[in-house]
Image: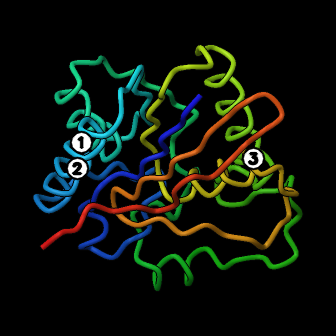
Amino acid sequence: MRLLIIRHGESEADILKVHEGRADFPLTERGHEQAERMAEYVSSNYDISKIYSSSLTRAKETALHLSDRTSLPLIMEDMLMEFNNGLIAGLSPEEAKEKYPENPNLQIHEAMYEMESELEFRYRAEFILSKIISENPDNSTIALVSHGGMINQLYRSFLKLPIDTDIYFATGDTGIHEWLVRPGDRRIVMANYIENMD
């Protein structure tokens, strides 16, 4: 099985420079251009079997570009949504830091400010990755459109890293990550490929 993990395009929150998470901002014009270029590249280079998408607007709008190119319906998956950042969603970093200061002693099962815990976030990644792999044939190519934080968690799950690891995987707007899943063999073929934006 081939998995293409794709981050959404630029959103209005990027322009406003606010915490996004569960704040449901749409793509910018540039974000739509990025998504269209991603869709053109993916549809030209892969035979996509299914498209799964986070149900947040910026991911759904990105995935729709790929859906239009491939004539495949979107399968909406809430478990692909970004980290639930609770009360800081939509706030500037300065306002969030003042109203909701971080607790460096928080345990992985604990959460504050109506957020989900790190343990709950990792569980979502483990669950959805297992579900998608198990419900699709070995010869399929599956596209997942999600978010930077969730993609990082999917990497950690895919590589079976510990929950409290300090290893992070970067991904840019419409970054494409290609993974192969075979019995007893998991491979990262490509990480964070982005079609050139002039």
- Give the mark toward the camera: 2 or 1: 1
Query: What SS does tag 2 mark?
Result: helix
Q: Residue 180: give x, y in percent of width and height.
A: 62, 39
Q: Is residue 114 left or right of residue 166?
A: left
- The Cα–Cα distance between marks 2 and 1, rounded to whole angstroms, is 6 Å
Q: Is residue 195 left or right of residue 22?
A: left
Instruction: Indicate the quadrant containing the N terminus: top left, top right, bottom left or bottom right.
Output: top right
Which residue is labeled 1 in the image?
Answer: 39
Residue at image point 26% right, 61% down: 195
Identity, as a three-letter code, of the amino acid under mark 2: Ala
- Give the mark toward the camera: 1 or 3: 1
Position of 110 relative to 72 (above/below): below
Q: Earlier in the sequence, mark 1 or mark 3?
A: 1
Query: What SS does tag 3 mark?
Result: helix
- The Cα–Cα distance between marks 1 and 3, rounded to whole angstroms, is 26 Å
Rendering colour mode: rainbow
Q: Is residue 123 left or right of residue 44?
A: right
Which residue is labeled 3 in the image?
Answer: 157
Position of 4 relative to 19 (above/below): above
- Mark 1–mark 3 CB contact (< 8 Å): no
Mark 3: few/some/many CA within 10 Å (<14, 14-19, 20+):
many
Mark 2: few/some/many CA within 10 Å (<14, 14-19, 20+):
many
- The label shown at residue 54 is none
Q: Earlier in the sequence, mark 3 or mark 2?
A: 2
- Mark 3–mark 2 CB contact (< 8 Å): no
Q: Quadrant of residue 73?
A: top left
- Mark 2–mark 1 CB contact (< 8 Å): yes
Identity, as a three-letter code, of the amino acid under mark 1: Ala
- The Cα–Cα distance between marks 3 and 2, rounded to whole angstroms, is 26 Å
- The label shown at residue 35 is 2
Identity, as a three-letter code, of the amino acid under mark 3: Ser
Q: Residue 176: give x, y in percent of width and height.
A: 42, 53
